[in-house]
Structures are given as C-alpha cells and as structure tokens.
Image (tube, helix red, strand yellow):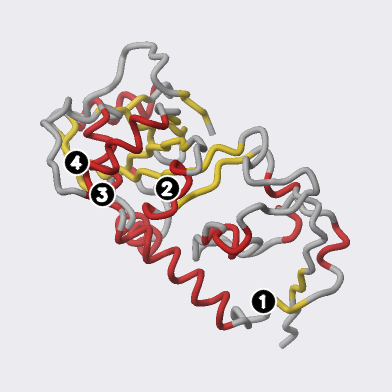
Amino acid sequence: MENNAIRFACNGCGICCKGRLIPLTLAETRQWLQRGHEVAVILEAFDESTWDSQPHQFTHSAQRAVEVTSGEARIRVVAVLAGNALEQCRNLGDDGRCGIYEERPLVCRIYPMEINPFIALDPGNKICPPEVWEEGDILFTDRVVDPLLADQIERSRQADRDDAHAKIALCEAMGLNVAAWKGNAMAVYLPDRAQLLEALDRHNCGIAAPAGPGWKVRVDAPALRHQLHQKGVALDDQLSTDYIFHRL
C-alpha cells in the first residue's frame, strides 16, 4: 500500500503569523496578556441532538466543553481563548522572525500539523507557499514521525480538556454569555485586556465570581433557530455590539 510522506521546511515567510486568531492555553493566555497583547474569546455551543458528525467526534468536542444551562435546556459550550493576530502577530519582528520563539504557544510549535484529530493535514488547505512542502523533515506518513511533535500535539489537546471549566468560569465572570451554534457561526468577543487579566488573576486566586446571567445562543438560520427554541434554549434576540457574529 502506497504511503505518501508529507515534508515541510519553513522558509520564514511569516504568512502564518498574519490574519488569524491564535488558540492559547490558559497559561499561554496569561503570558500573552502580560506582554500587553490582546486576546479574543470565541464561544460555540452544541448538543447531541443536533450533532450530525460521528459519535467519536462528539466525544472529542464534549471533552473540550462544559455543560451549562440555557433557558430550559442543557447545552455544551466551548470557549477558545486566542491571541489577536488579525492584522499580524504582535510578536512578529520586522525581519519576519518570531520575537518569542523559545516561548511561543503550543499551536505555533505544532504548525502546520492539526490539533483536531479529525482534520487531516492537507498542504492544499494551508497558506504556506508551495515550495515549503517540497523538502525538509517528514512530518507525517501513517503517523506523526517526530516524537517531540507528537508530544506537543497531545499536550495541546490535553490543555483543551483541562482548561475547559476554567475558561467558561472566566467568561461567566466577565458576562460573556452568548455563544453561537457550532458549525453555524462563531461568537467572537474582544474583551478589554486589563479586565481579562484581572478576571484570570481572580480565578487563579480562587475568588468566585458572582452568579452572572444565564447562557444564550445567537442563531440567525430560521430552521435551526426554531429547533433550538423548541428545545427550550434561550436565544439572543438583541442585536449586540458586545461580540462579532461570524457566520460559517
């Protein structure tokens, strides 16, 4: 059976450091904020009744999520904390080099490999120039070859699971309580950096936040909106400037 290896040799073009949000672990979020950089919060909700993928994919997503109350329903919410590099990463130097290379986030160390185990590495879906795939170390054949890379991928996945409850607690403490429905859209918040760092400090000190408003879901698709309403999910009916509603 033919087994085509994928090679990768970064040419330092820096294109992967621009026009994106960089997923961070909770510890990396603190470091990012302390450097004076901005962090976005992405919220997605889902439940098993509307899940149209394989059961093991639901299990993977559920391990990254927290079950919360929304109206009369119980749903799961995933919170992703991401370094804001929508223009470009603040750590990218004028020479195109990473200014925090030895302390760069796990997701940067893993790139171009995928963190999600159900997404195959496909050079055609990456923004890197074609020539970087023509030589260099073998990243993947029928498995991840580099044991260090394999360890970093697993550490990133485990951090997603370990940090899930803490990230939801942070959102609740800051009143970030509207999620989009997974696969339909994303709700993207751009909170004040100092406020997020303070909430993180309070959480790390074990200071419980007062109970905030219940969770809501923003959905524009009529059929999905009706389905969630029938389940008793609290829907966000107000046009809000608190978050960006990014349709997929």
Tell which of 40 and 8 is nearer to you.
40
Tell which of 147 and 197 is nearer to you.
197
Q: In what element is the residue under mark 2?
A: helix
The image shows residue 70, relative to residue 238, as above or below, that is below
Q: Which residue is mark 4?
A: 68
Q: How far separated are the C-alphas under marks 1 and 3?
A: 33 Å
Query: How many neighbours does mark 1 have within 10 angstroms: few (below 14), some (14-19), or many (20 or more)?
Result: some
Q: Residue at x 11, y 31 (%)?
A: 210
Q: Name the mark on residue 166.
A: 3
Q: Name the mark on residue 140.
A: 1
- Residue furthest to the bottom in view is 1
Amino acid carrying label 3: it is Ala
Do residues under tags 2 and 1 come within 8 Å of each other at their CB atoms? no
- Residue furthest to the top in view is 239
Q: Earlier in the sequence, mark 2 or mark 3?
A: 2
Tell which of 25 and 144 is nearer to you.
25
Please provide percent x and percent y for residue 219.
38, 25
The image shows residue 177, relative to residue 127, as above or below, that is above
The image shows residue 130, relative to residue 205, as above or below, that is below
Do residues under tags 1 and 3 come within 8 Å of each other at their CB atoms? no
Q: Earlier in the sequence, mark 1 or mark 3?
A: 1
Query: How many neighbours does mark 3 have within 10 angstroms: few (below 14), some (14-19), or many (20 or more)?
Result: some
Q: Earlier in the sequence, mark 2 or mark 1?
A: 2
Q: Quadrant of the C terminus?
A: top right
Q: Earlier in the sequence, mark 3 or mark 4?
A: 4
Q: In what element is the residue under mark 3?
A: helix
